[in-house]
Amino acid sequence: MKVNIKTIKDITVIEAEGNIDSRTAGDFEKATVDATQGEDKVIIDLSQVEFLSSAGLRSLLMLYRQVKARNGKIVLVGVSEEIQDVMENTGFINFFTLTELLEDGVKELS
Amino acid sequence: MATAKAKTTKAKTKAAPVETAILDKSITDIRIDYYPTHEHEGVKFRRGHAMPFGATTVPNGVNFSISSSAATACTLVLFDRGADKPFVEIPFPDEFRVGDVYCMIVFDLDVERLEYGYRMDGPFAPELGHRFDKSVILSDPYARSLGGRDTWLAEPNWDDVYPYRSRLAFEDFDWENDHPLEYPIEDLVIYEMHVRAFTKHENAKVKNGGTFSAIKQKIKYLKELGVNCIELMPIYEYDEWENSKPNPVTGEMLVNFWGYSTVNFFSPKAGYAATGKFGMQVDELKTVIKELHKNGIEVILDVVFNHTAEGDHRGHTISFRGIDNKTYYMLTPEGYYFNFSGTGNTLNCNNPVVRDMVLDCLRYWAADYHIDGFRFDLAAILGRAQDGSPLSNPPLLESLAYDPILAKCKLIAEAWDAGGLYQVGTFPAYGRWAEWNGKYRDTLRKFLKGDEGQIGEMVQRIQGSPDLYYYRGPTASINFITCHDGFTLYDTFAYNEKHNEANAEDNRDGANDNNSWNCGAEGETDDIEINFLRRKQIKNALAILLVSQGVPMILMGDEMGRTKQGNNNTYCHDNELNWLDWSLLKKNQHLFEFTQSLIRFRKAHPVLRSSTHFTHTDYVGSGYQDISFHGTNAWALDGSPGSRSFAFMLDGEHAKQGAIKDDTIYVAMNMYWEGLSFDLPPLSNGRQWHVFVNTDMPEKEAVNTLGKEPRTDSQSHVLVGPRSVMILVGK
């Protein structure tokens, strides 16, 4: 699992790559928490993520809660259909705004 | 090593300053029990906590705790998810044992991938009640989820050394502001359903058909119908492969479809979850419950605490038998299993250890899953002593009734068992328990098919059975005419006899006393008159059910004329015999609308939902008794043996014991084969009679729009057609 951080305008964009599961969720959390410290506009680009386990889904929700506590907003980008299905079935999807493309995510937060 | 990191953990010496300690996360670092003291094959562990039972995450590790009254030793067995072999087996050092409880904290485990079990050593002496076998890896009775049957009917590895694998579950679900709905029980309209059967049929047209998740896609339907409570047939983990066999005629696999055979009481059935293959069934089920609550629908679970899936002495050892056979099961003096459940064994519910497990389990489902209530399968067993004799004051039932966590949960008993104990009306209630009223079903069916001599009993049944529940009130009576056991409502009027050949038991299984009537031809027919009569009978049944005092329960699909082709025991069919065919909704739209209208009517009229019994007096000075009974002559009930018709009137001024003013409701039921003229009781204050239901009318005309009911042609009498029900509103 790899995490790249970049900034578009005032938005922090986190690009994840690989699977986010119990083995990698800790690293993912650390990287994202550090990168979003004090930020209130966050995009997580999951287009290179194939699988999110229960632990992975919880990392996302934890990040959502932290950003939301600052009245910030978080958008998930490029979530595969399969992961969307899992998120729908387990209720996690209800917390997030999803867009297909990064530019739509940027628009959403601009 | 897959799941245990072999890195060395050193105790941190830095402690937080005292004044900031409470706010400082590092306070957690100074507890010494967060660090290991022992090591076995590279896995670090220490003495654990005896409570709570099961596997619980603690800082840096997992606490394991399990009890056995007769084991001589216990070993914890840990697997990486799906692995053929355990990555470690750690014998509990004797100093870790507290009384009969073995407890241990193991560190640095990957809880998401962990599967755990136990080996218990001890005597194999069936005559003394012991059946220990340390070669078997045993499931934890307190496991929060189970692996091994992750996808419905996916072929398991039959040679697995550990087929039903205990797992942990994330228990941090975000419920937001959800809360059990806590409707007064008399306001419920219960819909009994099977998770897989509800949406598996292709005509259900849902994504992930047959799963928990798919229920969400039918919430709109449930709301349109108007039910405000669903009762789920068993969803505790069971093995659909149990006793599976090919049908000798068709070759189709017969399986355990219904699920009345629990493998683990704390785990939801993974095979019912679209995400079961990812181990996310806990989150999926909670999401469905949250969504149902958001839409005003309660969730009751059908729970099976009378036996387990381990069968009799020839059955598989999965968990309980190998952990503490004598504690968990009722045993004969020779060490065989009592069979009050009809399925091989009987859970020893009034043993204090088992009683605590049942209580822990229900508390868990109420608190962690926000379950609104429980229906207890063969609940009479829960009132039997350890030797099988019925108890007058069963401690388990008392504990459940007075438990603070379960205080607002509905508790519903199936008040009989397969050992001959029939307690409808006498089930120990402690002011809390309601019952599936089997006598309601039997009486209604006999009356509906035109049996003689039913009026006396019918008078009781429509009042909430005060003859059975005089001191408990009508809310003790769950009224139903059909349930998963037995015929559907359509089949009740399409078959005289059961047709269970497809079960491959030579039609021997299933009840013979169905009190059904085929209306003139056995099974499907083109006869227009017979089909009209069948539809009318279904409406008669639904109409009476929904105007009876007590709590109505409808069987999934009866509102659209579901058939099981005369099979009254479809426990083994994963096919159209059980799957609800949603195309029936279009075919029988009028039936759906009829049911929907009756439910709306019930909700609109509090006089139909009394929480107390009628007094048969006029205590509000309206000039009418709260309830009065009539025959073809007003004020004159004909209860003679040959009578097949009667009517009752509920005075609206007495609704909710006079607290609410409602319309007056008059219901005439004529199960005689010719039409009868009923004299109507006169209404005071210029009110007039209006027709809400006349089941003798064709299809859609059988029911009128709520609130827009037309006046009756005559205010002095009505003609109630042959085998028909009329509901009038006085306003």
Image: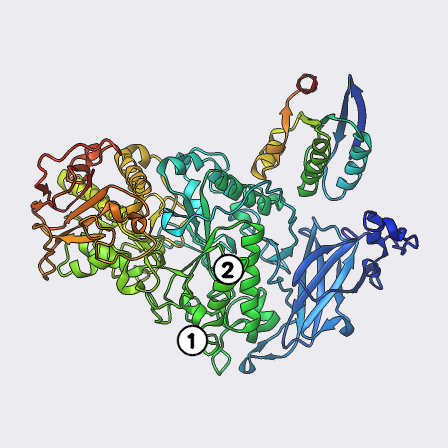
Q: Could you tell me how far apart the alpha carbons at marks 2 and 1 are, in whole angstroms? A: 24 Å
Residue B37 x/y as whole percent: 85, 64
Taking B577 as reference, is B380 above or below it? below
The residue at the far front in this view is B621
Q: For the point 45% across and 68% down, which residue is it? A: B382
| First of labels 2, 1 by sequence position | 2
Q: Quadrant of residue B117?
A: bottom right
- Where B719 falls versus B62 (above or below)? above
Q: Nearer the viewer, mark 2 or mark 1?
A: 1
Whole-percent x, y for residue B566 in the image: 27, 51
Q: Is residue B154 visible?
A: no
For the residues tagged 2 and 1, is the chain the same? yes
- Helix, strand or loop status at disc 2: strand
The residue where tag 2 is placed is B262
Residue corresponding to mark 1: B391
Give the quadrant of the C terminus of chain B: top left
Which amino acid is tagged 2? Answer: Thr
> Residue B140, percent across and down?
62, 62
**In this rendering, is residue B419 above or below B522?**
below
The answer for which chain carries disc 2 is B
**Rendered view: B129 above or below B503:** below
Q: Nearer the viewer, residue B670 or B630?
A: B630
